[in-house]
Structure formats: structure tokens, C-alpha cells
Image: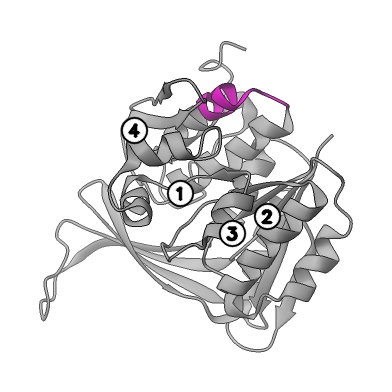
Amino acid sequence: MKRIYVVGSMSMDLVVSTDQVPSKGETVLGNTFFTTPGGKGANQAVAAARLGDHVHMVGCIGDDMLGKQILENLKHNHVNVEYVKKVKGPSGTAHITLADNDNSIIVVPSANHKVTVSLVDSALSKANKGDIVLLQQEIPADVVAHTVHYCYEHELTSILNPAPYRDISDDILEQVTYLTPNETESENMFEGDIDQALERYPDKLIVTQGALGAVFYDGLEQIEIQGIEREVKDTTGAGDTFNGALAVGLQKDDSLAKAIAFANVAASHSVTALGAQGGMPTINDIAQDLDM
């Protein structure tokens, strides 16, 4: 079976829910507070591991208590941690505010900015042709660019989730196998002309649209894969669940449309519980939706 390598961030999420997001200079009362493992890389690895198999995490944690908790959570979710490196200093954190069925996040990268090209090369040297590599942008830009190029040169399937948004070079756009921005990231990347961008990157650019689903261009026409609406408790991990599940769909050699539909179902389940990983489903959780 194809292996999935997730090259990315790991952090601890510090989450507060509130009825009102404070304005500048304002203090408001929150309703609940909790901590939960997160980071876009770790989230995608856990999402993939709950739905598939042979998932490897590649990245850095700090030498603190949070790092220990992050590592144990990955192991608990059956993610291979051979290429998780402990470095001096604090682990990454994400400070999340939940309000009005949406979220806002401030990320403090810390150890995640110590991910290196050599760590990636060490991990991917064990990969076989066709294995899948998931990337996000909470690690250094040069490492992301190097990893995409490595995948291109070694015939590995790369999926870049360009979040948080930063400029992406033309080389990355050409060499990456799949690019999965949401609507806001797409507008920033392509100056608002999403339809034209979809046609320019057929079977590569997949634009996620929250509960509405996702859209891509198959070379002949624009294909809209419908989402599934559910009662929302926390949207924090929905995008990461989509990307992890997309990797699993491709791991099973599904068509792109079928893999996206699979990812939509998984993402819809993820919003039904608190925490980025709290609602991430197992394959049994979504079997009925898939008519399995």
C-alpha cells in the first residue's frame, strides 16, 4: 500500500469559546477553555491515520511538556513518529477563538520553524514511487519548496494545502501534484479569478468551499463535488480533515472526484465536535455516508 508522509507543523491548541469576539481594547467573557493537540501537519496526519494506514509524521516538537503530549497523541492515533525530531525550546502553539460557528487563530510556530531540508530528505529517502506527501505552510517556506521539488523529481504525489497563506512561486505551482486552497486563499493567490485559475491548472487545483464542498477542473469542465451540511460545533479542523482524507482517497487509488467526495464526507463529520481533532472520523464513522 502507498504510504502517506505528512511534512508539517505540530502544536498544542489553546481554545476559548465566546459569544462575542472582542474589539480592539475590549475585554469580553469566554464560555469555555480547553487545550488539545493540533497544528495543521499533525491534524492532517491524525485525520489520515483514522481513515487509512501507513501514515508518517515529519516535523519538530520542543523539549517541553507540550511536546511530550503532542508526541503521545500521534502515537495514540497510530501515526508513525520515526521522523518527529525533538529540538531545544518550546513546542508550537495555536491560540484559537471560537465564536458564531467560526474560528480565528493566532499561530506561534516555535519548534515548527526548525524543520529542515535534511530532516525531510531523511524521511522521504524511504518513500517509494507513488507515495503521497502532504504539506502546509506552518513550516519554513524553503522547506516546503524543497519538498515539492523532491516529490517532483522522485515521482511522489504531493498535496500542498497553502495555509496559512503566503506567496507561492510559479515553480511550486507547476511541480506540485495537487493544490488545495480554500476560497479566500484562492482569491489571494489568483487575484480573485478562480474560474480561470481552475482551467489553468486542471486536475491540480482543488478549491474547498466549506459546507458547499469543493470544485476542480477536469480538463473539459468544472466539476463541483457537493459538501454535506451538519450541525456545527467547531470548524477548526475541517480543512485539515479534508486534506488528510483526500490523501487517503488517493492512497486507495480513487479517481480525483471520488477522493474529493470522500474528503468532503470526512470534513463534514469533523465539525460536529470540539477541537481540531475531536470530530475527525474513522472509516466506520463515515461508512453509511459512503454507502459502504
Q: Which mark is residue 237?
A: 1
Q: Do the residues labelled 2 and 3 touch (CB within 8 Å)?
A: no
* Nearer to the camera, 17 or 226: 226
Residue at mark 2: 6
**In the image, is 2 to the left or to the right of 226?**
right
Name the residue that disc number 3 marks: 171
**Residue farthest bottom in this picture:** 88
The earlier-in-sequence mark between 3 and 4 is: 3
Vertical order, 149 against 95 (above or below): above
Of labels 4 and 2, earlier in sequence is 2
Which residue does the image show at 81% across and 59% down from the upper left?
A: 124
Residue 253 horizontal/vertical position (percent): 72, 26
**In the depicted structure, whether residue 28 falls above or below residue 231:** below
**Which residue does the image show at 36% across and 46% down from the upper left?**
235
| Residue 291: mark in rendering | none
Between the residue at mark 2 and the residue at mark 1, the CA separation in whole angstroms equals 16 Å
Q: Indicate which disc, 1 or 3, sits on the residue closer to the N terminus.
A: 3
Q: Left or right of 12: which side holds 29? A: left
Residue behind mark 4:
211
Q: Which of marks 2 and 3 is nearer the N terminus?
A: 2
**Camera-side mark, 4 or 1:** 4
Name the residue nearer the viewer: 123 or 36.
123
Q: Tell me the magenta residue range.
A: 253-262
Where is the N terminus found, in terms of image quarters? top right
Q: Do the residues labelled 3 and 4 touch (CB within 8 Å)?
A: no
Q: Is the magenta stretch mostly helix, strand or loop?
A: helix
Residue 109 place in picture, x, y as percent: 51, 76
Q: Which amino acid does label 1 sit on?
A: Gly
